[in-house]
Image: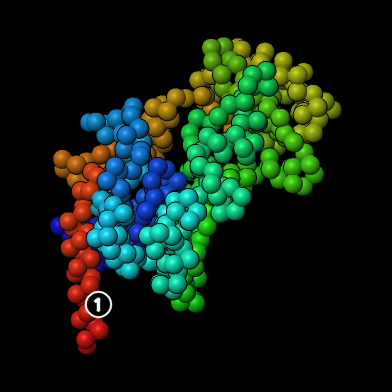
Amino acid sequence: MTIPTSAHDRKDISPGPLSGVVVADFTRILAGPYCTMLLADMGATVIKVEAPSGDDSRTWIPPAREGVSTYYLAVNRNKHSIVLDLRDPADLETAHEIVDQADVLIENFKPGGLLRYGLDASQTTEAHPELIHTSITGFGSGGGKNMPGYDLLVQGLSGLMSVTGSPERDPQRAGVAMFDVITGLHAATGILAALHERGVSGQGQHVELDLLSSALSGLVNQTAGYAACGNVPQRLGNDHPSLYPYGPFPTAEKDLIICAGNDRQFARLVSNLGFGWAAEDPRFATMEERNQNRSTLRELLVEALSQNSAEHWFEVLQEEGIPCAPILNIGEGVQFAERLGLNPVVTAGQQSEEVPTIKHPVQFSRTPAHYGKAPPRLGADSEQVREWLLSRSRDSAQETSV
């Protein structure tokens, strides 16, 4: 088995847009691994360096597939796992050899945590001027450098929980580690930008991200409202602070989400619900007026929707181009995407190692994402990685002698 690093090596698949890029992945849990999986899907060669205990998410069970954490499976396909104990001189030397071959190093150690190994950004960027060293922390390298970076802490500290849930109940966390995911996406964007700039300048750089900054950016209109005019939003349950109707409404048997984002959509909505006059009523004619008269308008909507089922109204209103949707569970959501032809589930790996996973979110017309390698067992590729390093060293020596 060889480790492909270019389109030439990948004869069995279409070359990805990042074919030839080598990533040294010293991350664990979610934000970093999600980022590096996206890069690997796009053709980058990702060497996943794990401590002897392995990525923490390997132990996060349930749920599990054949004894393996699905949390781990979700973000680690297309990678090559090697076990290295950085406290061991020989293993540390191997880690440095991997970095020597890398275009990108990505890690989520606490600030300063890699100094004793010679792998801190201040050290790697000096030793390797073309390297893109990407650091992910919870709260930056300043006053928050000693704070552990768990997504739930950031959900609380960023203000997200204060605007999530019913105003009559306690603040709520989101149902997924959303700021880990957003930070992973930001990291991928930053890495791609730095690689592009390196193609112009020939120089690498240190790319830094922290969960809190990603959270404040990801809260978009909520944080912008505070920054621009001092507005501190409060919990509104499923209502939107600026749009109405925009949220779930009861029908004859379950809720239906309705999103009327402008006056035209509102006019079509009330027309199909049987009280088209409301579009001309001064209480409801504009978004500002609808926001000021929510309770009265809600009564009219609930009364009309109660005449039939959510499925009925979904079909009727969708046909008229009115944004709406029933509330599905995760399984139903995946099945709905399948019905739309989005093919959300793809198989990573081959034969006995095949694992169903959720597809890469970007579609490329010429260089599609690939799913050739299943999420690796701990250390499954250690021997192959060492052989690959040796071959790269030999190739480099031959080029130098010539």
Question: Residue at 61% across / 31% down in the picture?
Answer: 161
Within the image, what quadrant is residue 97 found in? bottom left
Question: Residue at 48% across / 56% down in the picture?
Answer: 112
* Left or right of 37 in this view: 184: right
Q: Residue 147 or 70: which is nearer the viewer?
A: 147
Q: Amino acid at mark 1?
A: Ser
Describe the colour scheme in one phrase.
rainbow
Residue extending farthest bottom: 402
Image height check: is 398 above or below 192?
Answer: below
Residue 299 seen in render? yes
Expressed as whole percent of the image width and height from the top left, the position of residue 318 reads 55, 30
Q: Which residue is mark 1?
A: 396
Mark 1 burial class by Cα count in 10 Å: few <14, some 14-19, many 20+: few
Expressed as whole percent of the image width and height from the top left, the position of residue 254 reads 54, 15
Question: Residue at 53% across / 19% down in the picture?
Answer: 310
Image height check: is 241 above or below 253?
Answer: below
Expressed as whole percent of the image width and height from the top left, the position of residue 245 reads 68, 27
**The C terminus sits in image quarter:** bottom left
**The N terminus sits in image quarter:** bottom left
Expressed as whole percent of the image width and height from the top left, the position of residue 105 reads 40, 60
Within the image, what quadrant is residue 274 found in? top right
Q: Residue 77 or 17: which is nearer the viewer?
A: 77
* Secondary structure found at label 1: helix
Q: Residue 209 or 336: which is nearer the viewer?
A: 209
- What is the number of callouts on the image? 1
Image height check: is 237 above or below 26?
Answer: above
Question: Residue at 23% across / 70% down in the picture?
Answer: 392
Q: Residue 99 or 118: which is nearer the viewer?
A: 118
* Left or right of 4 in this view: 305: right
Residue 195 seen in render? no
